[in-house]
Image (cartoon, rainbow, N blue to C red):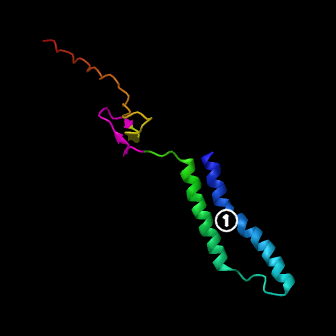
């Protein structure tokens, strides 16, 4: 779902501009003005509005974390421990790395005299 929201937010300014350009250019051409005259102020205002709306949409779509972020690291056994948040109300306080048994050393042969 999140990727569809990102794609829609990416394509929305282009679609809005092309719809506007089609309507405005036809209207300007029929009035006898230059159809390629661009109203930069209104385009910048629309872009700013869409950016702010995008921030609100992304804020509503993402989970809020109240804990402290612990970055990914390599555990003592050499496995990757993924990044996580500690101290969230409904999340585990710590993600334990997988435990693997210690390898047993191979016995060295005793030389015979």
Residue 4 in the magenta stretch? The answer is: no
State which quadrant residue 94 falls in. Answer: top left
Q: Residue furthest right?
A: 30
Q: Quadrant of residue 105?
A: top left
Residue identifier under label 1: 13
Task: Name the secondary structure under disc 1.
Answer: helix
| Residue at x-position 58% and y-position 63% | 51
Answer whether residue 23 is visible to the viewer in this image. Answer: yes
Q: Main secondary structure of the magenta part?
A: loop
Locate the N terminus and report the quarter of the image it occupies.
Answer: top right
Identity of the residue drawn at 17% across and 14% down: 110
The residue lying furthest to the top in this view is 112
Look at the picture and state if 44 lies above or below 84: below
Would residue 82 appear left or right of 24 to someone viewing this image? left
Segment tinted magenta in the rendering: 66-80
Quarter where residue 90 is shown: top left
Residue at (62, 64) in percent of width and height: 50
Q: In terms of depth relative to the viewer, which is nearer, 18 or 75? A: 18
Relative to 13, say whether 60 is above or below: above
Q: Is residue 71 visible?
A: no
Q: Position of residue 14 (x, y in %)?
A: 69, 65
> How crowded is the residue under tag 1: few (<14 C-alpha within 10 Å), some, or many (20+)?
some
Residue at point 75% right, 71% down? Answer: 20
* Quadrant (top left, top right, bottom left, bottom right) of the C terminus: top left
Location of residue 65 in the rendering, given as x and y in whole percent from the top left corner? 44, 45
**Residue situated in front as seen by the camera: 56 or 47:** 56
């Amino acid at each position: 779902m999140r990727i569809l929201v990102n794609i829609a937010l990416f394509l929305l300014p282009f679609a809005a501009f092309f719809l506007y350009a089609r309507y405005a250019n036809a209207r300007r051409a029929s009035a006898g003005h230059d159809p390629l005259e661009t109203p930069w102020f209104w385009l910048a205002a629309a872009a700013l509005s869409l950016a702010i709306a995008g921030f609100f949409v992304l804020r509503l779509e993402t989970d809020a974390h109240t804990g402290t972020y612990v970055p990914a690291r390599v555990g003592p056994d050499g496995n990757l421990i993924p990044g996580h948040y500690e101290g969230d109300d409904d999340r585990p306080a710590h993600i334990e790395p997988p435990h693997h048994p210690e390898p047993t050393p191979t016995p060295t042969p005793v030389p015979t005299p």
